[in-house]
Image (cartoon, rainbow, N blue to C red):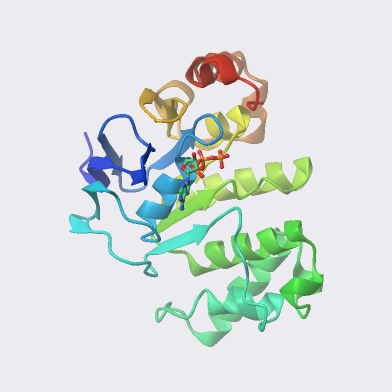
Amino acid sequence: MTQAYLEFHGVTKRFGDLDVVAQPFDIAVARNEFVVFLGPSGCGKTTLMRMIGGLDTPSGGEISLEGTPVGGPDHRRGMVFQSYSSFPWLTVAENVLFGMRYRKDLTEREKLARRDHYLDLVGLYEFSNAYPNKVSGGMRQRVAIARTLAAGSDVMLMDEPFGALDAQRREKLQVELRAIQRRDAKTIVFVTHDVEEAVFLADRVIVFSKRPARIMADIDITERLGAERPLDLRDTPEFFQLRTAVLRLLREAAGDEAGDEK
Ligand SMILES: Nc1ncnc2c1ncn2[C@@H]1O[C@H](COP(=O)(O)OP(=O)(O)OP(=O)(O)O)[C@@H](O)[C@H]1O
């Protein structure tokens, strides 16, 4: 067993008298692991992500990174959230460049090359000089993705980052994200409602019940599918079987309210 890198120790969360988690959470994420959180709408996934990112605090217990409790947001943790807003006073290209301000290991020239590479990857290169509030919501989301990937933080927290993308772009970014995670040894925690996306990307899928959340299942995907994820993996019987099994678990997790999963 690899040593834990990102850890939840007995974490609980309440908003007033609303319990987000049913029992204290203990979750250990290894360095370089790609973990996907799946669960019914409103079960608390975004709240868990915000707590990892230091944007919210647990009511009890502790979240730690490399043995140090998580404080406020810091550049070791890059974040893409559903409601992510870019800096409106910076152009699309400047937003991506801004994400690399802590990368002292890169020259200016390397930063510019990374900026252009990731803008191209998300299909925004030609909008480099546009201001974020002049482009669509889906495009703003892509600015956030490009910025986070270019920044290359050790830990990436991604809350439905591909939700507003068309199917083709989404597929391309899934393949790229998995490749980046493998090549650059990133630790990624990712939330999605899309079971196929979860199984394709994850080393491990954690399925939560509806709120108050319990951990319903913790599935080792890499053990079953291997670590390499070429696009045609989706056409294999192994992938199909696993996807079906996870979908069933998610339906179970949602109980009677199984209306929102895909
Ligand atoms: N700041 C807050 N104050 C009070 N209640 C909150 C707050 N933030 C979240 N909640 C509640 O906590 C619960 C969990 O919300 P959260 O957004 O974490 O769920 P989620 O699993 O991410 O949902 P979705 O899949 O729809 O994005 C919900 O019932 C929500 O209304």
Q: Residue furthest left?
A: 67
Is 168 rendered above or below residue 212?
below
Q: Which quadrant of the figure contains the N terminus?
A: top left
| Residue 179 coordinates in the image, percent (x, y) | 54, 48
Q: Residue furthest bottom?
A: 108
State the residue in front, 134 or 156. 134
Is 21 rendered above or below residue 138?
above
Image-based side of 130 in relation to 177, left or right:
right
What is the quadrant of residue 109 in the picture?
bottom right
What is the quadrant of residue 139 in the picture?
bottom right
What is the quadrant of residue 23 in the picture?
top left
| Residue 11 coordinates in the image, percent (x, y) | 26, 42
Question: Residue at horizontal 61%, vertical 17%?
Answer: 240
Is 195 rendered above or below residue 27?
above
Whether residue 131 can be seen here: yes
Image-based side of 221 in relation to 256, left or right:
left
Whether residue 184 can be seen here: no
State the residue in front, 179 or 205. 205
Question: Residue at horizontal 53%, vertical 86%?
Answer: 108
Question: Residue at horizontal 67%, vertical 72%?
Answer: 116
State the residue in front, 149 or 260. 260
Q: Which quadrant of the figure contains the C terminus?
A: top right
| Residue 118 coordinates in the image, percent (x, y) | 64, 65
| Residue 207 coordinates in the image, percent (x, y) | 44, 27
Q: Residue furthest front?
A: 17
Is 45 rendered above or below residue 144?
above
